Amino acid sequence: MEYKIKGYKPESLFRFFEDISAIPRSSGNEKAISDFLVSFAKARNLEVYQDNANNVVIKKPASAGAEDKPAVMLQGHLDMVCEKKADVIHDFDKDGIDLIVENGVLRANGTTLGGDNGAAVALMMTILDNNTLQHPPIECVFTTEEEVGLNGAVSLDKSLLKARTMINLDSEEEGVATVSCAGGMRYTLSKKADKETVSGSVIKISFSGLLGGHSGTDIDKERYNANKLMARILYRISQNRQSKLVSFNGGNKDNAIPRECEAAVCFANFNEAKLAAQTAKKMCEEFGDEILPSEPDFKYTVEVTENSKMSVFSSEDTKALINAVCLAPNGVRRRNPKQGYFVVTSLNLGIVSTSDDKMYLVFAPRSSVSSLQEETKDVLELLADTFGFNTEIAGQYPGWSFAENSPIRDVFCESYKRLFKKELKIEAIHAGLECGLFSDAIPGLDAIAVGPTIRGCHTPDEYLPLDSFERFYMLLTDVLKQIAQ
């Protein structure tokens, strides 16, 4: 293939990133990238293990003189969040990522880039491929389905690993080391709701252009949730009118703040539909004053279709869904004033969807305090009971607690200061990382999470400054060299 990224070192790092970008790797569709890594390892005579969940572990012996050093684990995940702009045609199950290099920045053509966590995969491949580096024994762990609940890390047989030092490569800010994270889960409300065919006039409302973002690292930025905005309008236009919901669909990932939403409501009387449409347009205009300072690309459409047959939900189910979304908790719920008002507990209403016979609300609750996570679960269960929804919890994963003493953190701090003449920032994040699962399974594990700068994760605006990627490789290989000495 002809590579697009040129002029950065080592060349192999950027070529490996382009190689994996050509392979579709949505969550649950990692078989091809997993097999690619197995072939990569075998071609280099490296020990490799692949399990039924398509997790891959590749082991590389220490460089000469470091054979007696303890093993170090490098870890990242294979899957990526697959989001695209509404007008972009792209099949994430079949198409590779169309990369664009512009002004020293790598991005994708209208889709997520997959830097989260393709950067980690390319970094590990480069280290495994380079026989000139000084390093201890290395265990590279590539996990699957991280973006939908850390499922691969849960199922991986941790007894395969000898390392008691872990370098997670899923952090997204150069110059920052993450040393603690929140736990999380996927919480789904579902309701069986039969539809009937009626005649009437329909209002179709759509939102687009919101910033969205990562439901953990961006939740404190107070970005607007398209599902919550839509519910405000639907509630208002349905008051004192005979209306029935045709559809309500917004967001497609529980861990991405929804940027777009579409809904349709049926009114038996055309005049009522026109009045409702006027109300909807007025509210959208008011949203402009409310939203535009922080969401400059917000767009909306309101359309009325007269006298047609359609399938609708009952008045009761219509009310249940709209009211549930209106009252659903969303965003930051608790901060810690003793830690700079760091976010402790939050949740994101990432998906609202309707089908012929079901309604869904899907949340991503997060917390670094277990009792507060339990409170959120209680609130969601109460919401479900109030409006007749069933509940399901999946993909639960633990938080990762701060360690007072961490040799790997000390090495990173020393290397960063020596290389770049400034201090490495140490922080906790509100996103979920696989460090908690590995720490729970491996007693005494010394872990850190680091990575190059990646912006706009979980959105089509994701991008990676190439010089940051270059510098981070320099830091990582220097740390491995220090451990080997």
Image (cartoon, helix red, strand yellow):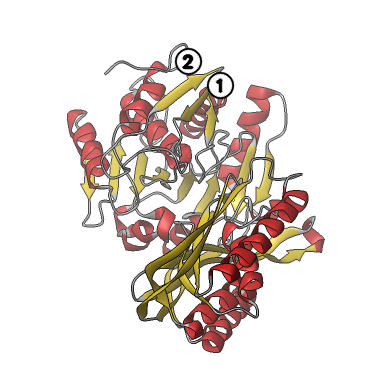
Q: Residue furthest top?
A: 7
Q: Position of residue 221 (x, y in %)?
A: 70, 51
- The front one of 2 and 276 is 276
Q: Position of residue 11 (x, y in %)?
A: 40, 16
Is there any visible trace of residue 346 in the rendered image?
no
- The front one of 168 and 409 is 168
Q: Residues within 10 Å of mark 1 (few under 14, many from 20)?
A: some
Please name the residue shown 57% across and 82% down the image.
383
Q: Element at badge 2? A: loop
Residue 118: which quarter of the image? top left
Give the quarter of the figure containing the N terminus: top left
Q: Position of residue 294 (x, y in %)?
A: 73, 45
Q: Position of residue 400 (x, y in %)?
A: 56, 60
- The front one of 468 and 124 is 468
Please name the residue shown 41% across and 74% down the image.
312
Q: Are marks 1 and 2 in contact (CB under 8 Å)?
A: yes
Please name the residue shown 43% across and 48% down the image.
81
Task: For marks 1 and 2, give the CA distance.
Answer: 7 Å
Q: Residues within 10 Å of mark 2 (few under 14, many from 20)?
A: some
Q: Which residue is mark 1?
A: 467
Give the left or right position of residue 219, taking residue 268 as reference.
Answer: right
- The front one of 475 and 392 is 392
Q: Amino acid at mark 1?
A: Asp
| Circle on res. 120 | none
Q: Which residue is mark 2?
A: 8
Give the left or right position of residue 136, taking residue 37 as reference.
Answer: right
Residue 145: which quarter of the image? bottom left
Q: Establish if 309 lies above or below 420.
A: below
Is there any visible trace of residue 198 in the rendered image?
yes
Give the left or right position of residue 198, taking residue 472 as reference.
Answer: left
Q: Element at badge 1? A: helix
